C-alpha cells in the first residue's frame, strides 16, 4: 500500500521515530515511555505544530483532543518500529538516501536544505536519517501485515456484488485500472544471517533457472514456495499497482505475459515471479469488480493495521507522563 510518502513526510516534518538516549537533552523532558524507547516533549510539540498546520479551517477539535491523538500516533509508530527491528526489518543507507531525495524533489528543494532545516529544528543529520530509517521500517512492517491479510478472492467479490443486488444497491462503475495476474515462488531469508541468506539465494536461483527453462511453474511453487499461495501454485490472483512491495511491483511491471523473472529480493525473502496476464479493466463489469476489489482490499488493509496495533499494545509497556 502507498504509505511511503505519508510516512516519510511525517519523519521529516514531525521528527517521528524511535528516540535514542544519546539524542535526549535534559530540557526535552519525556512525554511517554514506549517499551525500550521514549517520546520527548520536543517530539510531541513538533508533531502538534505540524498537525495544527495541516488541519482544515473551521476544525473544532480541542487542543487536548489533538494532543491526545498526536501522542497516540507517536506511540503507535514507536511500537511498529520496535516490532520491525525485532523481526530484523531494516532500512539500508541507499533506501534512506532515496527517501530523502524523493522528499527533496517533492518539496522543490535539496537534501542539504532538508538537513539544514532539521538542524534549525534541533535535529542532527544522523538523527534525521535515523528517523527516516524508522519511517521506512514502519512502512515495511505495515506492508507485511497487509500483504498477509489483504488479498481479495473472486468469491469475495461475487458475494459482495450479490449482496448489493439483493439490497438493490447500485454500485459505481469505477475507473479502468492496470491489473496484473501473477504467480510467485517465495524462499524466505533472514537478512541478518549471511549463511542462511546465501542458501536462500542459491535455492531461488536454482528454482528460477528451472522455471525459465520451461518447468511447470505451478508445480515448482507447490513443491518449493514458502508463501501461503503455494497450495494454489503460487497464484496471487489479480492485483493493481500499489498493492505489492516496491521490489515485487517493479519486477512485475517489467515482465511480458508468460515471462518468468530473475530472482527478486524483498523484505519477505527471495521471489521468482511469472506474469500470467495483464489487463486494463475496461468493461463496466470489470471496472465494477475492480472497484469492489479495491474497496474490500482497503477494508482488509485497515483491519490488518488495526489488528497489528492491538497486538503490539497488548504486550507493550506504555507510560504516558504528560
Image: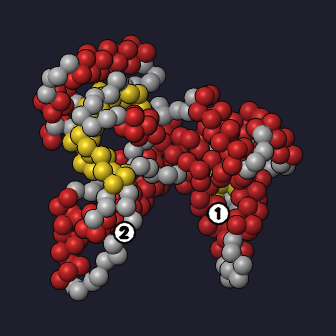
Q: Residue furthest bottom?
A: 168
Q: Is residue 159 above or below residue 115?
A: below
Residues at marks 2 and 1 touching, judged by CB atoms closer than 8 Å = no
Q: Distance between the residues labelled 2 and 1?
A: 34 Å
Name the residue carrying label 2. 174
Looking at the image, residue 299 lies above or below residue 106:
below
Label 1: element kind: helix
Decide: is 151 above or below 193: below
Res. 69 in view: yes
Residue at image point 18% right, 30% down: 217
Q: Position of residue 279 (x, y in %)?
A: 30, 51
Residue 248 in the image: state x and y as whole percent: 39, 37
The structure's colour scheme is secondary structure
Residue reaching furthest to the right: 120
Question: In the image, residue 319 lies at what x, y percent?
Answer: 61, 55
Instruction: Write the residue at 55% across / 54% down.
Output: 76
Q: Can residue 115 be seen in this view?
A: no
- Residue on which the image places disc 1: 70
Give the crowd class for mark 1: few <14, some 14-19, many >=20 residues within 10 Å.
some
For the C terminus, the quadrant is bottom right
Q: In the drawing, does residue 216 fall left or right of residue 252?
A: left
Q: Decide if residue 119 is on the left or right side of residue 9.
A: right
N-term-proximal mark, 2 vs 1: 1
- The residue positioned 28% from the left and 69% from the top of the image is 284
Amino acid at each position: 500500500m502507498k504509505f511511503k510518502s505519508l510516512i516519510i513526510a511525517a519523519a521529516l516534518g514531525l521528527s517521528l521515530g524511535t528516540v535514542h538516549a544519546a539524542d535526549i537533552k535534559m530540557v526535552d523532558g519525556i512525554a511517554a515511555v514506549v517499551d525500550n524507547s521514549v517520546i520527548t516533549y520536543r517530539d510531541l510539540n513538533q508533531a502538534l505544530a505540524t498537525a495544527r498546520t495541516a488541519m482544515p479551517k473551521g476544525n473544532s477539535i480541542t487542543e487536548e483532543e489533538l494532543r491526545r491523538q498526536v501522542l497516540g500516533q507517536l506511540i503507535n509508530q514507536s511500537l511498529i518500529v520496535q516490532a520491525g527491528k525485532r523481526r530484523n526489518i531494516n532500512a539500508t543507507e541507499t533506501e534512506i538516501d532515496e527517501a530523502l531525495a524523493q522528499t527533496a524533489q517533492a518539496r522543490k528543494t535539496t537534501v542539504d536544505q532538508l538537513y539544514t532545516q532539521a538542524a534549525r529544528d534541533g535535529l542532527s543529520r544522523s538523527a534525521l536519517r535515523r528517523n527516516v530509517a524508522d519511517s521506512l521500517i514502519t512502512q515495511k512492517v505495515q506492508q507485511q501485515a497487509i500483504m498477509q491479510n489483504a488479498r481479495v478472492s473472486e468469491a469475495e467479490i461475487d458475494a459482495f456484488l450479490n449482496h448489493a443486488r439483493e439490497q438493490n444497491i447500485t454500485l459505481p462503475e469505477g475507473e479502468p485500472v492496470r491489473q496484473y495476474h501473477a504467480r510467485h515462488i517465495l524462499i524466505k531469508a533472514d537478512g541478518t544471517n549471511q549463511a542462511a541468506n546465501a542458501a536462500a539465494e542459491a535455492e531461488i536461483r536454482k528454482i528460477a533457472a528451472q522455471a525459465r527453462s520451461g518447468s511447470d511453474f505451478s508445480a515448482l511453487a507447490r513443491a518449493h514456495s514458502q508463501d501461503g499461495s503455494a497450495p494454489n501454485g503460487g497464484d496471487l490472483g489479480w492485483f493493481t499497482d500499489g498493492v505489492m512491495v516496491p521490489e515485487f511491483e517493479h519486477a512485475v511491471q517489467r515482465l511480458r505475459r508468460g515471462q518468468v523473472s530473475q530472482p527478486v529480493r524483498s523484505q519477505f525473502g527471495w521471489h521468482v515471479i511469472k506474469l500470467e496476464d495483464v489487463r486494463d479493466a475496461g468493461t463496466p463489469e470489470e471496472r465494477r469488480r475492480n472497484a469492489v476489489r479495491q474497496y474490500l482490499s482497503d477494508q482488509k488493509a485497515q483491519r490488518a493495521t488495526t489488528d497489528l496495533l492491538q497486538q503490539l499494545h497488548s504486550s507493550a509497556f506504555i507510560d504516558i507522563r504528560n
